[in-house]
Amino acid sequence: MNPIATHKLCAAPDDVARLGFAVAHELNASLPPVQGADEIIFNNAKAIATALQNAKHPVIISGISGYNEGIIKAAYNIAEALNLSGKQAGLCYVLPEVNSMGLALMQVPSFDEAIERVQSEEGFTVIIAENDIYRSIPPVTADSFFSKCKNVIVLDSLNNLTTEKADVLLPAATFAEGDGTVVNNEARAQRFYQVFMPASSAIKESWRWLWNMQLLRMQKSNGSVHSEELLEKLETLLPQFGGIAKVAPLHDATIHGERVPREPHRYSGRTAMNAKLNVSEPKPPGDEDSPLSFTMEGYKGIPPSEITPFFWAPGWNSVQSVTKFQKEPGGALKDGDPGVSLFKEKPGIMPIFFKDIPEAFVARQQKWLVLPQYDVLGSGELSIYTKAIEELSPQPFIALSEQDAGKLKVEADAVVKITAGQNEYILPVKVKKEVSNGVALVSAGLKGTKAMPWGGWIQIEKLSGQ
């Protein structure tokens, strides 16, 4: 975004939050000012506030990669201050994984609390669903956690360090092999459907494995269950998910007695797909979990947006026909965008603003605030499984400011030892002028990297001979 930005401020997370609170104050004078704000924050806040007031459709984009609660609160204050002034502002939080918002809405305990429990109590059986603990937890901490668990059950579709710790490993379906529901970063519940049947009948969606475990625990027979039934139970247990059961048509829904075909009527080559095994085309697999069929035959009209498997119209090439399904080009789909928004607007209710403004960041002696440095090519969990992307991924590094590199007497590409509690890391140095003094950026998610105590403090030591 830097090349198109009119204003840039590279600062420690606390100072970024202070800028956000200063912008909110400029938009709404009833909000508290930022005490001790320097001229840089003051001037940037006035300019940003003016730009937002002049914008037709302002959108505030924030996230959690800074591991700072103040930034999240400041972004909310800015958006609500704009709304009070008559602007319909958008607010977007960028989250690390597809269902992060759904997990947050459940208000589940943190992993830190799980660590405390296994340390203080015995006999725990831990179930880990499609999450590599080692990608987000320092290795010594993760090893200690697993060593205290009596049994470890892991559900996953990938082999990783966490699956290697499993006493029981269950094959979970990928997004293409299973059906399910997720809550995206705008708190919109969305249904996804399997593209093809998995190669083995032992592969099941994680939610189905968990349901089977529950039945075994309750000593009940393995009865079939459909996702909408579980979503109804979820609504009862957690009211904040109200309406999620209506996220898509029922699994046995039809249109004029016909299911919606996954394949367009010009799906060529279907008969040749398995010709090497048998020249006789096998019967298409059935689907008891969705209103879709694994065929070309079925309903030929425009299906509901929640179960539209593809876009096609006469005279148009595939996705170019999307305008035929929209109310207007670039607009919403004719029967509404798919999904259910779990955040309900409440007109007439005054917003509650956050007023706990953090103090200005102060660098510590011999310690650095460590934050993740993500890379477009390589930081994604699936990137390391793709050879072409892996070849383009950078080597892991630690980035320091020019002043901090000078204090440590290290130059670019020098190797340093990083200590975080009982965890030690060896990484080369990059010197970046945009990094704040007292802050260290460390490569996150790249192959060969280990998780850091993000948002915590580390020590850095120049290795002898450098």
Image (spheres, rainbow, N blue to C red):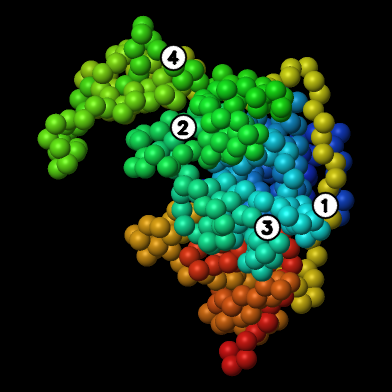
Task: Kindly state the secondary structure of the residue where label 4 is placed.
Answer: loop
Dot 4 or dot 3, earlier in sequence? 3
Q: Which residue is mark 2?
A: 179
Dot 1 or dot 3, earlier in sequence? 3
Identity, as a three-letter code, of the amino acid under mark 2: Asp
State whether residue 34 is above or below residue 255: below
The reply to whether discs 2 and 4 touch (Cβ–Cβ < 8 Å) is no
Identity, as a three-letter code, of the amino acid under mark 1: Pro
Q: Is residue 331 visible?
A: no
Distance from the alpha carbon under mark 2 to that under mark 3: 31 Å
**Which label sits in the foreground, 4 or 1?**
4
State whether residue 355 is above or below residue 289: below
Q: Which residue is mark 4?
A: 253
Q: Which residue is mark 1?
A: 358
Q: Please give left or right for residue 266 compared with residue 425 in the image.
A: left
Distance from the alpha carbon under mark 4 to that under mark 3: 44 Å
**Residue 150 circle label:** 3
Dot 4 or dot 1, earlier in sequence? 4
Residue farthest to the left, as pictured: 279
Dot 1 or dot 2, earlier in sequence? 2
Nearer to the camera, 125 or 265: 125
**Which label sits in the foreground, 2 or 3?**
3
